[in-house]
Amino acid sequence: MKKLINIIAMTVFIMLMSCSEDFINLEPTDTVGVKNLYLTDSDFNDAVNGCYSGLAEAYITWWWYGDLRGDDSYDELVKGHSDFDLFSLDVNDGTVSTSWRNWYIVVSRVNEVLAKIEEKDVANKDGYIGEAKFIRALAYFNLVRIFGDVPMITDPVTSTEAYSIPREPLGNIYNTVIIPDLLAAEKTLPVTYSGSLVGKATKGAAKSLLAEVYLTLKDFTKAETKLQELTVAPFSYALLDNYNDLFYYDQGEHHSEYIFDIEYITGGLDLGNPWINQFSPKDPPTLAFYGLTTGDGQNNAPFGLRDIFPAGDMRLYMTFANGFTDSDGVYHQLMPNSNDVQTYTRKYIFVTQSSAYDSGANWKVYRYADVLLMYAEALNENNKPEQALPYLNMVHERAGLTPIAGGLSQTAMRDSIALERRLELSFEGKRWFDLVRTGKALETMAPTGMKDYMTIWPVPQNQIDLYNNMDIFWQNPGYN
């Protein structure tokens, strides 16, 4: 089975655990309904699946943060998303407010599971704890990368209690929650799953996330160790032979390169995502060619991105398009006009959907190419450019390119790895956070309007209003 979620059980769980407009307001934990959720192994399986479903909701707009904010995506029509693209974000932005709420819904669900499971004796207790801690670590990692200091909540709380919890320095969140949760998760999670469980967080997923955390904190020694572990037994990750096969979703998404995805399923149950239609142009011939009924022309690929691809790089086809070639070999180019765009990406277009805005394409959080490039980066930052080269070349050569020659300096290798990540991972939510992590965001994005304080977003004004206490909950500098 492609997906991990028992849809009926998950839907019931979400109904019972849904949050109000407050960022952390759980259903009362002493109600009969919620108490009865946490009795059996099956109950905790459903509860953990509810945490995964929270991730699926939160990641719907992840491309706004990871792609649109950077230089490899832009809002060509200057509609709806231009505040992200042009660094003109308002403190009352609805998407930012929704993201804050969605990430804390995930945290709330995990905290509830962890609190309840401590007092129970269920068959897969360690596994559920590992999954829950991985999910919480991922949620907090994304929260601090978006907002900086945020409230650190690790136990179930009411909304009243939540609004007395101050913003915590992000270093404390890394050291108190994110890293300990991932160290615990990698010990208890399995290397692989089988059958309907495929898609859950694994030991490799925990190590991959922990490695990126270490890279973000510039602890390159620990990052190198963690990434090296992913290249040897018991792990058997391998690059697919053909890069394009990563994006033909109906061929299967849990292949040798897969490490962790956000799982979606089409079928009219509100468990899919809208990207196939959001990212497709409005051009009727193009829509007809791909079998689509509608397109929004969002998440556009700039021509500058196209121009950095080397000749023969097979990744260009999926990454950048400004037309299509029909079955007769005739090329149809998108033409600029007031209602449509000139470019789009094909990375989310090759998938079956039951209806418009209901795609089953997964969001790739970690795949092996990403791990190999992070490993090359860690090795190079530890002054081992020659040891980094083979891992860089594994990704480079898979794209149909000749190997990069040895003898690069650490600086030249650093630049080569950054370029390879850009070519390999465009439109997968990586670029902006790579720019910030490597200190390149301001020099890259200043021409678009970025100021030095804009490495993080404003916290939602509605949260500041609800706290009503600037001593413990303040606006990020520059957004006042």
Image: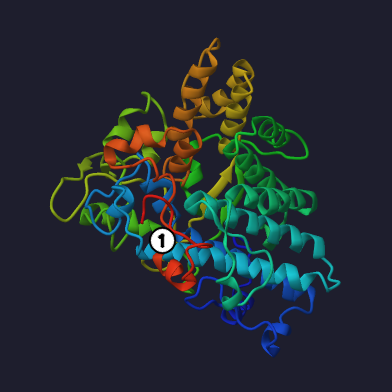
* 366 vs 313: above or below: below
Q: Dot 1: what SS?
A: helix
Q: Is residue 456 above or below residue 436?
A: below
Can you see residue 199? no
Residue found at the far bottom of this picture:
32
Residue sitting nearer the eye, 354 or 450: 450
Quadrant (top left, top right, bottom left, bottom right) of the N terminus: bottom right
48 horizontally vs 25: left or right: right
Residue corresponding to mark 1: 96
**Seen in the image, is 434 located left or right of residue 81?**
right
Q: Residue at x 74, y 57 (%)?
A: 130
Q: Is residue 442 above or below residue 384?
A: below
**Residue closer to the observer: 46 or 434:** 434
Which amino acid type is shown beneath numbered disc 1? Val
x 56%, y 69%: residue: 105
**How many numbered callouts?**
1
User: Which colour scheme appears in the figure?
Assistant: rainbow
Residue in the image at 33% along x and 42% along y? 450
Q: Position of residue 268 (x, y in %)?
A: 45, 73
Instruction: Tell which of 385 and 232 is nearer to you.
Output: 385
**Mark 1 packing: few (<14 Cα in 10 Å), some, or many (20+)?**
many
Q: Closest to the observer: 218 or 52?
A: 218
Is 58 on the left-hand or right-hand side of 47? Answer: left
| Quadrant in the rendering for residue 211 | top right
Q: Position of residue 444 (x, y in %)?
A: 35, 33
